[in-house]
Image: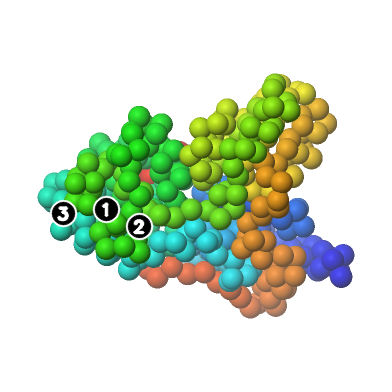
Amino acid sequence: QDEDCERRIIAAKAALGKRAVILAHHYQRADVYKHADLTGDSLKLSRLASATDAEYLVFCGVHFMAEVADILSKPEQIAILPDLAAGCSMADMANLSKVERAWRELAEVLDPDEMVTPVTYINSAADLKAFCGEHGGIVCTSSNAVKILQCAFSRREKALFFPDQHLGRWSGYKLGLSPDEMPVWDFDEPMGGLTPEQIRKAKILLWKGHCSVHQMFQPQHILRFRNQYPEGKVISHPECNFEVCKNSDYVGSTEYIIKTIREAEPGTRWLVGTELNLVSRIAEEFKPEGKIIQFMASTICMCSTMARIDPQHLAWTLENLVAGKVVNRITVPEAEAQLAKLALERMLEVSI
Ligand code: CIZ
Ligand code: SF4
């Protein structure tokens, strides 16, 4: 059945030719990834896709990524997500009504000239990016969060960072902020569970969100590795908790992790704290150079929503396109898309 599915994907791809481009995120499973025309992180994929003349952008990733592809692509291009249930649990931890409530509550405590800049990680719904566009805010990725926060601080004194507290905390730490300058905004509590005093003292208010995959990595995984292989290197994604990042030799985005290991000396040993599909892929890729690449946790940590994009859904999507039928199109309403684009463009101006 797997082989049958593979044949169907190859046949449909051939029939569509240059009309469709298949994009696959680094976290995508191997049996889907191998059919990709373009691979990368979410932002790189959207930019590469909009630079093509393809009519259909078949995004093998999660929902917010297909939204970004729709926002940044040409008007005639159509973004498609092969399974609409492929969401991101972290992105779901912030929604517009909770962010608007936080905004109102902050306005009660802070003077207008002390108000915060909203900064959203790209892992968020389009309406939150639009909120940022409307309120002088900006989008960031895991590659540029430090630079984007610096830019936010050059405009206003404080930032509200959502949805990932860990990326926000690590970036603030890199900017020299102390823990009490970065309290957590608990969106289930009135006033984020903070006192007016704490809010006034804060430089970054960290939304209480996290990635369920990266939270599995723990400092003891690193300790065990270092005891066994003192010469080994540890590299982690900034969605990992603070202690994991602090105990790593390198911290950075998926693109950064791949580049760092690619450029490392042959024969080096690595412990990697990010999604399993990515780690397994680079372990294979760099094996011929004698690089030994280990996954950080002993349990399996895959992005289960990303894994919903399976060969069956990809085959079904492509075959419908061959038959002239667009399924699972992702469209961001025009007004929302324009504001979200503004927040994305502010980021692109600061950082390429
Ligand atoms: O922006 C992306 O693609 C994600 C989710 C992570 C990363 O570090 O690339
Ligand atoms: Fe979202 Fe985590 Fe999956 Fe990334 S790994 S897409 S943050 S759930």
Left or right side of 212 for 10: right
Picture quadrant of residue 168: top left
Label 3 is placed on what type of residue?
Val
Circles 2 and 1: CB distance less than 8 Å?
Answer: yes
Q: Is mark 3 within 8 Å of ligand 2?
A: no
Q: Earlier in the sequence, mark 2 or mark 1?
A: 2
- Please report the residue visible at 70 percent of the width from the left and 41 percent of the height from the top: 295
Q: Which disc number belongs to residue 309?
A: none
Left or right side of 247 for 278: right
- Estimate the spatial distance between the alpha carbons at disc 3 and disc 1, rounded to whole Å: 11 Å
Q: How is the image coloured?
A: rainbow
Picture quadrant of residue 327: bottom right
Left or right side of 311 for 272: left
Q: Which disc number belongs to residue 186?
A: 2
For the residue pair 91 and 334, the one nearer the viewer reads as 91
Q: Is residue 48 above or below residue 175?
A: below
- Please report the residue visible at 44 percent of the width from the left and 55 percent of the height from the top: 209
- Estimate the spatial distance between the alpha carbons at disc 3 and disc 2, rounded to whole Å: 16 Å
Q: Is mark 1 within 8 Å of ligand 2?
A: no
Q: Residues within 10 Å of mark 2 (few under 14, many from 20)?
A: some
Question: Which residue is identified by label 3?
Answer: 109
For the residue pair 276 and 124, the one nearer the viewer reads as 276
Question: Which residue is identified by label 1?
Answer: 194
Q: Earlier in the sequence, mark 3 or mark 1?
A: 3
Circles 3 and 1: CB distance less than 8 Å?
Answer: no
